[in-house]
Amino acid sequence: MSESEKFDAIIVGAGPAGAACAYTLAREGKEVLVIERGDTPGSKNVTGGRIYTYALEMLDQGLSEEAALERKVTREQVMLLGGQRAITIDFHDPSFNRDGHPPMSYTVLRAPFDEWLAGKAEEMGAMVACGIRVDGLIEKDGKITGVIAGEDEMYADVVVAADGVNSLLAQKAGLIGEIDFNTVGVGVKEVIELPASTIEERFRLTNPEEGVACMILGCTEGIHGGGFLYTNKESISLGCVFMPGEVARHKKSIQEIFQDLKMHPAVYPLIAGGETVEYSGHLVGEAGYRGIPKQIYREGFVMIGDAAGFVINTGYSVRGMDLAILSGIAAARAIVNASSPAEIGPLYMQELERIQLLPTMRATDGYFDVLQTGWLYDRMPALATAVMADLYSVDAQPPAKLSRGIREQMKAHGISVWDVIKLGFKGVKI
Amino acid sequence: MSKIVACYKWVLDESDIRINSDLSVDFSKAKGKISDYDRNAIEAAVKLAEAVGAKPVGLTFGSSKARQSLKDALSRGLEEAFWVKAEEAENADGAVTARALAAGIKAMGDVALVICAEGASDTYARQTASRIGALLDLPVVTSVLRVTVEGNTVTAVRKLDDCLETVKFELPGVISVLPEAFQPTIPGLKAVMAAGKKPVTEYDCGSLGVNLVSARKVMEVKAYAQERRNIIIEGDNAAAKVAAVVSNLKKEGVL
């Protein structure tokens, strides 16, 4: 660092995006300062969650092997809840976890993971300052030139906003407005401790390395949203995400709906006897490609990770951490390759294309329309479970004709053939 | 420049310590931190050093885990950190701790004042200051609420059970400060950044000749939990309910 205390880059936020950016920049010999508000990286995080390893491998080969991760995901599940009924779809593909290759994805607890990744950035030479809140940006001649934290000012060629969803820095930079409640979900999560062997028994896993990622539909009382469950080594992360606008109008609170999910006959046996060691809530971006702000840079300033809206929700899986890491790498490459600070922003956009982040976001844009379909969140799971109930009910009476039974159940659940066709049209655009 | 030494201990964060159903204690998830009270001692050293133009330094006796403490301590305004290192520190009693710290104080030299907290946030044994004073043959003042230094004279106000006592002594000496005496400040960005560049000296207990044998042996660590009877007394008649409470208390032998 020079006498004038000016860094090549100041990164605000030591999550995966910020740490990946810092790691890459420091490896290229840049002077980097990471400022983290939590006392340790990850201490403020609430993510589910799971991470796809390809992003870590892109950051540095072999990194996913030493990362602080939980269980490799060997079973992908979707659970449909209708009243007391439940359907669980359980998908298993051994090719996702082949010998000699990094497993495709892992469940992860973010406190240890973020601390580990920030530590890697520090090993590379980045400076990480924790327990510091950035209060504002320093602007000179229309350019962002540094940050203000308490009484201290710190200068850099570029400030990287990696401060998560609802980025206060991006607001201060004038790139986004107040948060729009239609573009975010509000999530709650509990981490429930259970012995590893109990988790393996309940989820039919053969060893402590294997794990389950499960999305749950039909647990939000018709509110747009859904549940998630991830098996960690010795705990289960169970949570639920809701659109805040609809929750506000709903008679039950988020905690009550979440409590009902925990007590559901298909969910309770999975967590019974466990101890809740963590309860937390956070916002999560829900708008996919459309949630990316129009402009994610200005001179001396770029946004990465959740701050830039890089989250994909397809309904059957959620991605954010891998995209965060990709965007951190892209920003770092732009900073390294730019010959002047003015070039960083446009180069960053190019790198986001080259690293396939923006193409991926575009390719999954259609899911947003599908997931806007209101009846997916209550009537669809109710219908599906009711049809199953008809199928499996056996008594002394002759069974109803299947096709008629389905038609009657569709009518009873208020879903028309036309509704399904409309959804199909949205679906084929994906 | 003479030194004002703040002694501090790297302890487990009590909020991360879990108690199992069999009353065994689970320390495995607990992270470390500088003992809360020792942050006051550090603040005291920084403030007093500023007032008299001395150099505020930190001193800790700890295992390899205490390495994490150095940056934190230095971000709180200390100019240099000294670390007397031994794995035995984790099970050390008050005598071993004081011997190690006293050896560190001797080794760094030119110490005007040693400041300890009244007790550590894990054991709160309240021994360190007095034992260091005894080992180094220095005057000791405990329970210090306020302190000023003029020239070579320290004036300290002690908070006792029912009065305040003002005492004076000549430097060098040892004091232990009460938690309310100095409010620690939260380090700012520049202080945190500067901490990484400040000098750290590691002392090996062997070369300092510290006797690390604890006289105290820890036999068992067990949690204390109150047993609850979980009796709910229902009914509409207040007098009957009170009578039921009284009869239950009598049954428990508390009345």
Image (cartoon, coloured by chain):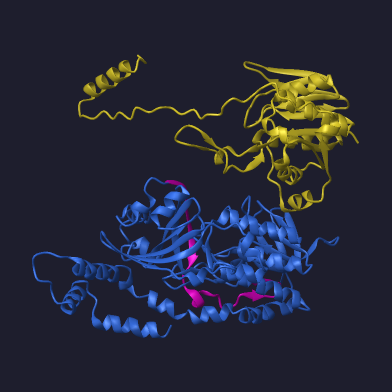
Chain colours: A blue, B yellow
The quarter holding residue A348 reads bottom right
Position of residue A108 in the picture relative to residue A257 (left or right):
right
Is residue A104 visible in this depiction of the protein? yes
Q: x, y (%) of residue A187?
A: 44, 60
As drawn, B38 above or below A34: above
Quadrant placement of the C terminus of chain B: top left
Q: x, y (%) of residue B190?
A: 76, 53
Looking at the image, which is closer to me, A359 or A133?
A359
Is residue A142 visible in this depiction of the protein? no
Looking at the image, which is closer to me, A184 or A375?
A375
Q: Residue at x 57, y 65 (%)?
A: A167
Q: Is residue A124 magenta?
A: no
Q: Residue at x 66, y 71 (%)?
A: A329
As drawn, A144 above or below A150: below
The quarter holding residue B124 reads top right
Looking at the image, which is closer to me, A359 or A139?
A359
Q: Residue at x 29, y 71 (%)?
A: A380
Q: x, y (%) of residue A243?
A: 40, 66
Report the span colored magenta: A275-302
As drawn, B153 above or below A72: above
